[in-house]
Amino acid sequence: MTGSDPQNGSSLTTVNPVTEAGRMAPKEYDAVLLASFGGPEGQDDVLPFLRNVTRGRGIPDERLEEVSHHYRANGGISPINQQNRELKASLEAELAARGISLPVLWGNRNWDPYLPQTLRDAYDAGHRKLLMVTTSAYSCYSSCRQYREDIGVALTETGLDGRLEVDKVRQYFDHPGFVEPFIEGTAAGLADVRARLAAAGTPDAPVHIVFATHSIPTRDAEAAGRSEAEPREFEEGSAYVAQHLATAAAVIERVKAESGLTASWSLVYQSRSGAPHVPWLEPDINDAIGELAGQGIKGIVIVPLGFVSDHMEVVWDLDTEAMETCRNLGLAATRVPTPGTHRKFVNGLVDLISERTRANNISVRPALTALGPWYDVCRPGCCANFRGEKPTIAGADTTVGTGHDEYPAGGAGTAGGEGTL
């Protein structure tokens, strides 16, 4: 999947008439909720964790054990929980530095601390309005709506529906705080690979940048960012794909403008799971690297554009498998860091929080692509759950947690200036 021409790499400040319709007025919140996926922290945790991830799908333990090798090979420990502890501490420090009195709570979808208990603790501590920041930047079921559902289910199961209000910040795939660490890392990675090729006596050897993200079922990709009442057209028919392509293009343009370095690039996918007969987004990163080597590419820069931190799928699928593929093919390769606790990323998350709060409000909503800034309030049916409806927060079809204003009707989906990228 080859990238298109880069868009304007500077922050766009003009109002996007489509996404502006989903903007929520600032509120007074009691606390920030950092919500993440969760991961095992020892060998005994691996199977229970995988049961949580696959709950309701009827997958036997024998099959789960077969797919647990990447956790087993790393002592049964995913780095994600420790990374979230560090991100939580960094957010707390930045909020305090700005004089924003909002405690940061942390809850996971699939491992301790679980979201239902975090919500109970929040209520018991006297909090009534929470603003959720997730560790997923893009739009699709698993990275946006599923978080909204998990909070909706947790509010219902804990009996806190109607007593505790939870909203969420917008998906931040093109916010400068998320993108700029990748710009820095891509420039450094490209310089590193070119230097290694030069040291090997092939300074003009071709280099390719692969922007890697999590593969998802094609059906989920096609539903990402869509609503029957407000149809939009996205590149390759998917907001999930379009967001990655637009963000990658912004990275490439900024790297070229700031360092003078450039290379061909493409979007690739990793971490495919599920039944073999179900179509998922392709190409797989290892297949793509093999094809690139066959085309004469001698250097690879891997940019984990779809990921916030170096969790297991980055450590295993990229640092282990993809880098091994590069070594086997004799390619000079490097993997760019994820944002993690990069100062710009942490500052950007606090900016996103400040967009939504009355105190310390930031009214300008920066975005590095024409797709954003994304919605505060997701549209009806956006990123649909094909397994069935669940209680959901932070959307026009919200059923629990808060009474959002009705999503604006009319021409929001067909306003000018928002065509296919």
Image (cartoon, rainbow, N blue to C red):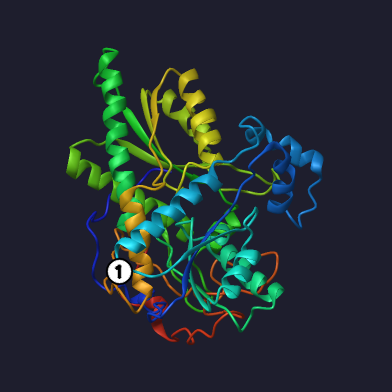
Is residue 264 visible from the viewing direction of this image?
A: yes
Q: Looking at the picture, tell me which residue is in the foreground, 59 or 339.
A: 339
x then y, percent, for residue 83: 49, 46
Q: Determine which quarter of the picture holds residue 41.
A: top right
Q: Name the one closer to the observer, 414 or 172.
A: 172
Say which residue appears at 32% left-offset and 33% top-offset: 189
Q: Which residue is mark 1?
A: 365
* SS at badge 1: loop
Q: Quadrant of the C terminus?
A: bottom left
State the image coordinates of residue 146 (x, y, percent, origin top left). 59, 63
Seen from this angle, which residue lies furthest front?
Answer: 125
Looking at the picture, tell me which residue is in the foreground, 75 or 14: 75
Marker count (numbered) = 1
> Looking at numbered disc 1 in the image, what kind of residue is underneath it?
Arg
Which corner quadrant of the image does residue 92 belong to? bottom left
Q: Position of residue 242 (x, y in %)?
A: 42, 56
Q: Quadrant of residue 263?
A: top left
In the displayed structure, 314 sits above or below 196; it is below
Residue drawn at 70 percent across, 64 percent down: 387
Q: Residue at x 69, y 73 (%)?
A: 158
